[in-house]
Amino acid sequence: MFDSLENVEVKAQQSYLQEGVHTVKVVEMKTSAQREGYTGTPYTEFKVQSQQGIAYLKLSGADDKTSDAAKEVRQKIFKRFLMSAGAKQFSNIPLACKEAVGSVIEVILGKREYWTNDKDTGEPVVKYVIDYKTSAPEGANLRFDEKNNKLLSPSDSAAYKAAHDAFLNASSGGVADSSMPF
């Protein structure tokens, strides 16, 4: 099947950081401008790493569709991150981002639930993403609070249940009942 595996390089598999407080090293930075053909809201993404895994912290920017209030909040979040990472030069944003790379900081990550339809089966499923919440310099002893997680709202849960019940009903020819144990 294979002649030789001697020259095949295998990298250690990385796991992704989950919700909580993590001490991480900022190892890389990319912007949406580096994505060919990207036309959405601009962003800057920092890859961070700890012994437990990696995370991609996506910090949204602003465009002409962004409200002034959202712009202000996003600027504060972005500057707090850069300050946590030891940046000192804020008149030159690319330079401030480069100053952040290599620093060790504490971050809070939260879990955000949402529901969508499975791309292969069409079945409604609940998924989640890990979002950046805040950061501080290393040693700040940040504390995680459950309110950093955003679970499905009651209305979203009801919409998911209705969509899932409809899917089960349609896929079983109208015989399915969510109260049945099978």
Image (spheres, rainbow, N blue to C red):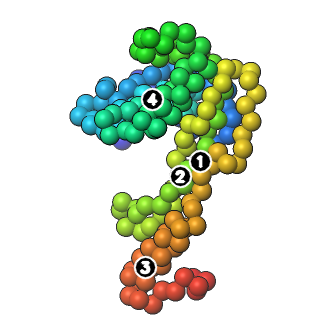
Q: Could you tell me how far apart the alpha carbons at marks 1 and 4 are, in whole angstroms?
A: 18 Å
**Where is residue 55 drawn, in percent x and y?**
54, 34
Q: Earlier in the sequence, mark 2 or mark 1?
A: 1
> Please, what secondary structure does the residue beneath circle 1 have?
strand
Which amino acid type is marked by label 3? Ala
Which amino acid type is marked by label 2? Tyr
Image mark for residue 128: 2
Task: Bin the neighbour count of mark 3 within 10 Å (Cα to Cα): few under 14, some 14-19, many 20 and up.
Answer: some
Q: Residue furthest front?
A: 68
In this view of the protein, which residue sits in the foreground, 1 or 36?
36
**Where is residue 118 drawn, in percent x and y?**
40, 62
Q: Earlier in the sequence, mark 3 or mark 1?
A: 1
Q: Could you tell me how far apart the alpha carbons at marks 2 and 1 are, in whole angstroms?
A: 6 Å
Q: Which residue is under mark 1?
A: 111
Q: Which residue is under mark 3?
A: 166
Task: Bin the neighbour count of mark 2 within 10 Å (Cα to Cα): few under 14, some 14-19, many 20 and up.
Answer: some
Residue at horizontal 41 percent and vertical 89 percent from the top? 174
Q: Earlier in the sequence, mark 1 or mark 4?
A: 4
**Where is residue 89 drawn, in percent x and y?**
50, 9
Q: Could you tell me how far apart the alpha carbons at marks 2 and 3 are, in whole angstroms?
A: 22 Å
Task: Bin the neighbour count of mark 1 within 10 Å (Cα to Cα): few under 14, some 14-19, many 20 and up.
Answer: many
Q: Which residue is under mark 4?
A: 45
In this view of the protein, which residue sits in the foreground, 79 or 152?
79
Q: Are marks 2 and 1 in contact (CB under 8 Å)?
A: yes
Work out whether residue 164 can be spotted: no
Q: Earlier in the sequence, mark 4 or mark 3?
A: 4
Q: Quadrant of the C terminus?
A: bottom right
Question: Does 21 sit above or below residue 124?
Answer: above
**Where is residue 169 drawn, in percent x and y?**
43, 83
Task: Decide if residue 147 is on the left or right side of residue 157.
Answer: right
Image mark for residue 47: none
Q: Could you tell me how far apart the alpha carbons at marks 3 and 1 are, in whole angstroms?
A: 27 Å
